[in-house]
Image: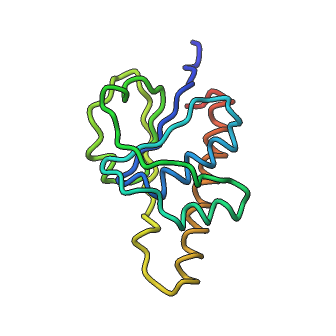
């Protein structure tokens, strides 16, 4: 049996401001144009400046990214949808059965409260977690393990 080929990947979360933006930026960097990568939100809030700054620390520039709302007409054009929070998973419109769905339940770094240094550290930890998940995703895609 031939493994399914995934060419179009969507990262979906509530606001398309932090987690999904970070995931899109990292995925573009890691996958190097091998896949069509996008992100969107259920209720877009604008790209969080800390997400931009956190990725700049590792040489990834998302400063020109825009927060986008999920287009249900376009949703079924993706081969793989990764939800990054329970809210997006719960509110995601019904997906075509041919679309692979993966859920990564990640806490929203924008909701973390603490000192400036603690918040920066939390964003870095979120970035690194997403980076590791995307590296694992790349490995699984290359091996046909999805």
If the image is split into quadrants, where does the N terminus sit?
top right
| Colour mode of the rendering | rainbow
Q: Residue 13: x, y in percent?
A: 39, 50
Q: Nearer the viewer, residue 89 or 123?
A: 123
Q: Residue 130: x, y in percent?
A: 58, 55
Q: Residue 126: x, y in percent?
A: 55, 64
Q: Quadrant of residue 110?
A: bottom left
Q: Residue at x 46, y 50 (%)?
A: 104
Q: Residue furthest front?
A: 64
Residue 43 lies, with reference to residue 114, above or below; the image says above
Q: Residue 72: x, y in percent?
A: 30, 31
Q: Quadrant of residue 46?
A: bottom left
Q: Nearer the viewer, residue 2 or 12?
A: 12
Q: Residue furthest bottom?
A: 115
Residue 74 lies, with reference to residue 56, above or below; the image says above
Q: Quadrant of residue 28?
A: top right
Q: How many marks?
A: 0
Q: Residue at x 26, y 45 (%)?
A: 91
Residue 116 lies, with reference to residue 3, above or below; the image says below
Q: Is residue 73 left or right of residue 32?
A: left
Q: Residue at x 47, y 68 (%)?
A: 109
If the image is split into quadrants, where does the C terminus sit?
top right
Q: Nearer the viewer, residue 44 or 94?
A: 44
Q: Is residue 17 left or right of residue 43?
A: right
């Amino acid at each position: 049996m031939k493994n399914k080929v995934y060419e179009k990947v969507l990262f979906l979360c509530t606001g398309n401001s932090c987690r999904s933006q970070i995931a899109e930026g990292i995925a573009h960097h890691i996958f190097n144009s091998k896949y069509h990568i996008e992100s969107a939100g259920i209720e877009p809030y604008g790209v969080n400046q800390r997400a931009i700054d956190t990725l700049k620390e590792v040489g990834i520039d998302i400063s020109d990214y825009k927060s986008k709302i999920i287009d249900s007409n376009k949703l079924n054009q993706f081969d793989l949808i990764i939800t990054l929070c329970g809210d997006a998973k719960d509110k995601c419109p019904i997906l075509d059965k041919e679309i692979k769905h993966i859920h990564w339940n990640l806490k929203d770094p924008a909701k973390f409260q603490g000192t400036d240094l603690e918040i920066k550290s939390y964003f870095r930890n979120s970035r690194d977690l997403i980076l590791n998940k995307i590296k694992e995703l790349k490995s699984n895609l290359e091996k046909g393990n999805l």
